[in-house]
Amino acid sequence: MPSRRPRALAIAGPTASGKTALALALRERAPVEIISVDSAQVYVGMDIGTAKPDAATLARAPHRLIDIRDPAVPYSAAEFVVDARREMAAITAAGRIPLLVGGTMLYFHLLIEGMAELPAANPELRAELAAAAARHGWPHLHAELARVDPETAAQLHPLHSQRIQRALEVFRATGQPLSRLLRAQQDGQGVAPIATDYDMTMVALLPPSRDLLHQRIAARFETMLDAGLVAEVRALYERGDLNPDLPSMRAAGYRQVWAHLAGECDATVMAARGIAATRQLAKRQLTWLRGPRSPAREAATGAWDTPDDQREILAKLLKLI
RNA sequence: GGCUGGAUGGCAGAGUGGUCAUGUAGCGGACUGCAACUCCGCGUACGCCGGUUCGAUUCCGACUCCAGCCU
């Protein structure tokens, strides 16, 4: 009985595609509550570089799941799914419609497809595995994975450090191969796909041309620099308890400014690298959105490019409510 | 004007008489608890004109341009 499920909306798109503006416009016309789907905006004190809405905007249109974590403490996709589910439930309980907005495609993907029951990140195990990799190289650990979980190993390149590490972490924590645990999801364990509980429609904002997107990214990064991005990162840099390996400090822009503050490059090179990193981020986001596993059901090309386009996509979204 | 050195893919930068640099940017792709992450794939580039040679980006000569030195 699909019609009994509560309605939910989602807007996804690459960085600098105008998601926030669209969400704010929608909120003025419909009883929606915004949930941020952004792995960088969750961190407190990372405002300019993550293009977080300013305080006045947030006061008028609250965003859930931003500023919920200190940059020293990693957030995770699994936590997001739990948090987002909780916020969605609270919003629907209040008689309003959840509007998920963001560009972190893994978060969207896990929320939509559901998530198997797996052990949480284990810092000790990860440190252990990282040390082993530094000693013997990732292909060695890949070979080890092939012995305990050949199915997963077959899907991973011997140099895919992060995913080899995760697969071995899961095996060492549970004694079970990751591939078997993922299959168990089919038996109803873990978090169910969103469609089980919500009638959700997602719209993807796709830029009309790569050139235009690149122009916007460059212009926006320069604007961030003018707005004090370097000072923002310097404050984080000077805290003393953060380091460039943290997920927060690896975010596009932050990593490059951090390197500049550490004396690795001058301001001109830093800006060029920051812009390039943002372009690469946008490219990966578009790969998710275009691919067979795209979380989006509908695409709105150029929706953000002109006021007319924005009106059009807005009308489309309002019709779904 | 003379001498010397150099000219390699968008950029940086090795190298060779005949199927290979590499890095970076760019493009395509992958992705189940770090994802703004991590990883994979993709480039007939050898300044120009002639010569030698079976074969020249590589050797020889002229030319153009650049850098340094000299007058």
Image: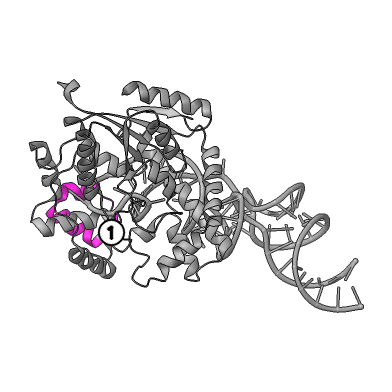
Q: Amino acid at mark 1?
A: Pro
| Residue beneath disc 1 | A74
Above or below, A37 relative to B38 = above
Q: Nearer the viewer, residue A171 or B52?
A: A171
In the rendered structure, the answer to whether residue A89 lies left or right of residue A46 reads: left
**Residue A290 placement (x, y as % from top left):** 38, 34
Q: How is the image coloured?
A: one colour
Residue A155 against residue A272 in the figure, above or below: above
- Could you tell me residue A103's position as x and y percent? 37, 42
- Is residue A305 visible to the viewer in this orientation of the structure? yes
* Residue at image coords 31%, 64%: A72
Q: Chain of mark 1?
A: A
Res A294 seen here? no
Quarter of the image for residue A212 reads top right
A244 relative position to A208: left or right: left
Query: Dot 1: few (<14), some (14–19), or many (≥20) neighbours within 10 Å?
Result: some
Q: Nearer the viewer, residue B18 or A211?
A: A211
The percent position of residue A180, horizontal first and vertical second, equals: 11, 45
Residue A268 in the magenta stretch? The answer is no
Highlighted range, magenta: A140-160
- Can you say which quadrant of the picture contains the C terminus of chain A? top left
